[in-house]
Image (cartoon, grey):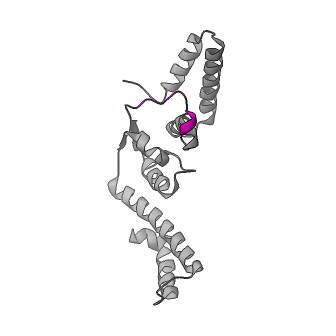
Amino acid sequence: FNRGLTASGLDTKFEELLHDIGLKRSLPKDLKERARRLTGEMRTVLARASVEALEPDLIILDEFQRFRLLLDLENGGEAAELAHELFKWGEARTLLLSATPYKPFTTADEDDNGEGHYEDFLTTLRFLCSGDEAWLAEVKVGLAVFRARLLAGEPVDDVVQLLRVLLLQYMCRT
């Protein structure tokens, strides 16, 4: 951690911040913002140092649906950033486990509370496929065709088989 702080220059930034804070009992807005940014940068260095010390081969998230924000770098905040430092370590593999099935639809109440099962599912798929947007687009098209055929009362066996083949590339049910 200390090597990381020195290499990134954060140790110097920390000393400068301490000097600027001095003996102040409360911090002005600009110093609070500097302290917040520096804390975030130091957490990232700490996460890297921790992962390096762990040297994981396998990362297992059991009941991962409880931690779905960790999978989403764009919306998961600092926790997601720290988790992704772990996920992308060397040759480590990540295994997500859950016995909770995804719901095929979102109710109006769930939607009002910010719960979108389809979007959660896509976020999980994006994580699993490491951002392979071509694969993800193929799955989205398959799901849209599946939905349209169900609503029209048309056969879906071929679409189900296509989705099965696509999804089994990154997940299984056993």
Vertical arrangement, residue 74 with respect to residue 124, above or below: below
Q: Report if residue 159 is visible in the image.
A: yes
For the residue pair 14 and 74, the one nearer the viewer reads as 74
Q: Number of labelled discs?
A: 0
Q: Is residue 20 left or right of residue 4?
A: right
**91 part of magenta stretch:** no
**Quarter that holds the N terminus:** bottom left
| Residue 116 in picture, x, y percent from top left | 56, 38
Q: Main secondary structure of the magenta part?
A: loop
Farthest residue to the bottom: give it. 23
Vertical arrangement, residue 128 with respect to residue 48, above or below: above
**107 part of magenta stretch:** yes
Farthest residue to the front: give it. 109
| Residue 89 in picture, x, y percent from top left | 43, 50
Residue 50 sits in quarter: bottom left
| Residue 123 in picture, x, y percent from top left | 54, 39
For the residue pair 169 and 29, the one nearer the viewer reads as 29
Name the residue at 51% across, 82% down: 17
For the residue pair 173 and 32, the one nearer the viewer reads as 32
Name the residue at 62% across, 36% down: 133
| Residue 149 in picture, x, y percent from top left | 64, 15
Q: Which residues are magenta?
A: 99-110
Residue 4 sits in quarter: bottom left
Name the residue at 45% across, 53% down: 85
Residue 99 sits in quarter: top left
Q: Is residue 108 left or right of residue 174?
A: right
Name the residue at 52% across, 56% down: 77
